[in-house]
Image (cartoon, helix red, strand yellow):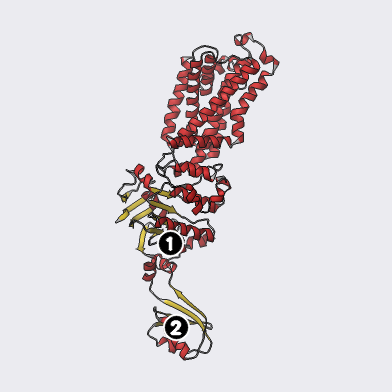
Amino acid sequence: MTALRKLTVTEFKLFLREPMVVFFAIAFPSVLVGILGNVDEFQKVDPALGGARVIDLYVTIAATFVLAMLGLQAAPAVLATYREKGILRRMSTTPVHPTNMLAAQLIANVTIALVSAALVFTVGRVAFDVALPRQIVGFAVAFTFTAAAVFAVGIFVAAVAPNGKAANGIGAVLFFPLMFFAGLWAPRETMSPVLRRIGDFTPLGAGEQALHDAASGAWPGAGSLLVLVAYVVAFGLAAARLFRWE
Amino acid sequence: MPIIEVDGLRKRYGDQVAVDDVSFAVDEGEIFGILGPNGAGKTTTVECVAGLRAPDDGRISVLGLDPRADRAGLRQVVGIQLQESQLPEKLTVAETLDLYSSFYPDPADWRDLVADLGLATKLRTRFGKLSGGQKQRLSIALALIGRPRIAILDELTTGLDPQARRDTWQLIKEVRDRGVTIVLVTHFMEEAERLCDRLAVIDAGRVVALDTPAGLVARVGAEQRIRFRPSEPLDDRLLTELPEVTSVTRDGSRVLVTGNDDVLLAVVTVLAREKIRPTDLRVEQATLDDAFVALTGRSINADEETKA
């Protein structure tokens, strides 16, 4: 247990030593909310969005962005680099199996995601009067399921990428289309029904929907949660089969 | 009582036979060397001993444990320094040692280790900023941090400058004196000769000799070579008739005499009697290099010389 704790603290430290990752995972999502919130148009109640404002939607989109940044970009690159450099192999010569490293990565990244998402909601609440999630248990469930799905895909990427650079590349290639379906460029509520339907079956689209439902006071939809579970099972099993320590 | 026993080890990668038939036993408290050219199967052999690879055939016992079946038990008692194994670039030396000591139930004090390894002034330096030699020494520290009973060190002093190399040899001797058995993989003759109590010479996946460094040298003969320039003309027959001398040859103005252990005294006595002074006198004994060439038919660094 002390080894896992030390590993987790170490992964936190290493995270904080990567200024670009820190910026995109922690500062950027809140800055994004801050900038969009200052656009007058986005502050106006829009009947087409069911009486919500654009800024209300962007808070959960930014929370999804945090998970995608950490789960698809940061964690896979770190793990693939650790394998490429023989760090996981060295660990496998000690009494502490490298699965502990995987666990430490997950704990560190999910904790960072929680902090960053909390920051996003704080900025939204304080600066633009965006309501905090009303169905708090539902929101925790939605966040957990989305994180699990995104990190399952991320660990799968780390499993198939031959090195850190490749993991970075694959992560980036997945990041942009998946964030599109989560509504980063245009909220899901403004998408055509077809695009929105496709988005329902992507991890970040389903995740954003679940987070959004819970934020606006409903229980996350069973359909969204089911899609997320499917990603966890499919990519989790594939990653478990394919992941190599060396 | 052997602490490591390897019997009939075989390992292939696809069509490539890495280890063909390797057997040896390591006694407790010795520094056992595995010597051979690049690609001889040295690393594969120790990786099987360490339980990192499954052998295709053969039996291995380490402190009575099967390295594959009892991997968990093995890792508590065996420390390994692997070739080309790095660490996170942005982790400092102190953080790395602190982390790795948390992996063992009763770790060594890493402050002592870094002092012994000359890393005490580098504790706050990040791994990525260390020199090759410093990285290597940190790697050795990590192999020793769990107070192993056996330390396996693969190409221990690669990348170290001559002074660091000698310091590292001294450290390894001290570690052995504390009762740790050491298995040293090397293709570096001087290291094998200075450090190892016994050596297995491996070539093309097979053990071609297993002996002490002196024993291996003795196999190529206890022949001594003397070179000198005589100050006065010298009749070769004065030397060839000595029973200690086996041959006398000339190389320009230099005379090369070979013979048994007592040849030097015999030759010098004759020269003194004849009032001939041997200038530029050199006495050469067979080295481990000569033994290696005799055993394998080529120099250990032949590959590298071709590459260079």
Q: Position of residue A30 (x, y in %)?
A: 62, 24
Where B230 falls versus B116 (above or below)? below
Q: What is the quadrant of residue A41 in the picture?
A: top right
> Which chain's residue wears label 2?
B
Q: Nearer the viewer, residue B298 or A136?
A: A136
**Residue B159 located left or right of residue A123:** left
Q: Position of residue B222 (x, y in %)?
A: 38, 74
Where A109 falls versus B2 (above or below)? above
Q: Position of residue A154 (x, y in %)?
A: 50, 31
Q: Earlier in the sequence, mark 2 or mark 1?
A: 1
Gap between marks 2 and 1, in whole Å?
35 Å
**Residue A145 located left or right of residue A168:** left
Q: Which residue is depicted at the point 45% across and 85% down? A: B268
Residue A186 visible (yes or no): no
| Amino acid tagged 2 | Val
Q: Nearer the viewer, residue B170 or B192?
A: B170
Other-residue count near label 1 (Cα within 10 Å), few / some / many at <14 / 14–19 / ≥20: some
Toward the right, the furthest residue is A40
> Which chain's residue wears label 1?
B
Q: Are marks 2 and 1 on the same chain?
A: yes
Q: Which residue is depicted at the point 47% across and 34% down? A: A104
Q: Nearer the viewer, residue B12 or B271?
A: B271
| Amino acid tagged 1 | Leu
Residue A238 visible (yes or no): yes
Where A209 falls versus B145 (above or below)? above
| Mark number displayed over residue B195 | 1
Query: Which quarter shows the N terminus of chain A?
Result: top left
Query: Which quarter shows the C terminus of chain A?
Result: top left
**Residue B246 located left or right of residue A78:** left
Other-residue count near label 2 (Cα within 10 Å), few / some / many at <14 / 14–19 / ≥20: some
Q: Which residue is mark 2?
A: B248
